[in-house]
């Protein structure tokens, strides 16, 4: 398994877990929790694939995505008590997910011969839109529309990849960029960073 596939599968699993955790937190039934996990895991990637013309979309061509999402159900329910004690577990899974999916979406868009600018945009779409769908379905205000730094962390990581790819091997650039997304998001929460806005 190469690094891109590892990132793809890892991102799918951690996003599915974050979606299922949201369902558990909202006291949804098993099917409701599965649906939240499903749309969180593949929603952003599905939109990206449709926009760049990659059809059928990825999860329809490879059933491992569905198996990974299904596996999130027993993981969350078997480990329900330890997870509930970890108040930041949902946040951590979501943060790891956006880091992984940002670079995955960017890489896939570049492989279709599209420009770096469009690739950066699709990286952000891949990372955040599954979470947007999850939040809407669970009756929460999507993180992307809040004051806190979320999509900006993905944007910064995507730009860093485009720059660092000129100086380092691709795998190294990917790791650096993924870590940067995660670190920016964690620091933003810890120190309450936010982007300026006009009320």
Image (cartoon, grey):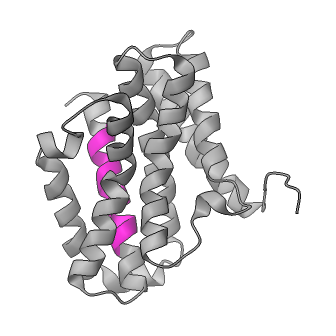
Is residue 18 on the magenta stretch? Answer: yes
Q: In this view, does 155 lie above or below 92?
A: above
Residue drawn at (18%, 38%), measured in percent from left and top?
56
Looking at the rendering, which quadrant does residue 23 occupy? bottom left
Q: Position of residue 194 (x, y in %)?
A: 78, 56
The secondary structure making up most of the magenta span is: helix
Query: Which residue is more in the foreground, 125 or 168?
Result: 125
Q: In this view, does 139 lie above or below 194?
A: below
Q: Is residue 133 above or below residue 118?
A: below
Query: Which residue is more in the foreground, 28 or 175?
Result: 28
Looking at the rendering, which quadrant does residue 169 occupy? top left
Q: How many labels does the image show?
A: 0
Question: Which quarter shows the C terminus?
Answer: bottom right
Residue 93 at least partly seen: no
Residue drawn at (53%, 72%), measured in percent from left and top?
88
Range drawn in magenta: 7-20
Query: Which residue is more in the foreground, 50 or 16?
Result: 50
Q: Position of residue 73 (x, y in %)?
A: 22, 73
Query: In the current view of this chain or complex, which residue is farthest to the top?
Result: 166
Residue 98 at least partly seen: yes
Q: Position of residue 66 (x, y in %)?
A: 16, 56
Q: Where is residue 19 in the image (x, y as percent from the top left)?
A: 37, 68
Q: On the rendered structure, is 178 left or right of 65? A: right
Is residue 31 on the magenta stretch? Answer: no
Question: Which quarter shows the N terminus?
Answer: top left
């Amino acid at each position: 398994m190469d690094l891109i596939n590892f990132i793809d599968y890892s991102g799918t699993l951690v996003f599915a877990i974050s979606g299922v955790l949201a369902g558990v937190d909202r006291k949804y039934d098993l099917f409701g929790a599965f649906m939240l996990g499903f749309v969180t895991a593949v929603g952003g990637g599905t939109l990206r694939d449709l926009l760049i013309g990659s059809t059928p979309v990825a999860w329809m061509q490879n059933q491992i995505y569905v198996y990974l999402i299904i596996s999130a159900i027993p993981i969350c329910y078997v480990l329900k008590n330890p997870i509930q004690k970890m108040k930041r577990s949902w946040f951590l899974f979501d943060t790891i997910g956006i880091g992984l999916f940002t670079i995955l979406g960017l890489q896939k868009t570049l492989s279709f011969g599209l420009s770096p600018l469009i690739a950066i945009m699709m990286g952000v779409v891949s990372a955040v839109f599954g979470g947007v769908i999850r939040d809407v379905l669970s009756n929460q205000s999507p993180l992307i529309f809040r004051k806190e730094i979320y999509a900006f962390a993905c944007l910064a990581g995507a730009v860093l990849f485009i720059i660092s790819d000129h100086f380092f091997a691709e795998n190294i650039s990917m790791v650096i960029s993924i870590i940067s997304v995660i670190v920016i998001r964690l620091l933003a929460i810890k120190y309450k960073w936010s982007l300026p806005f006009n009320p």
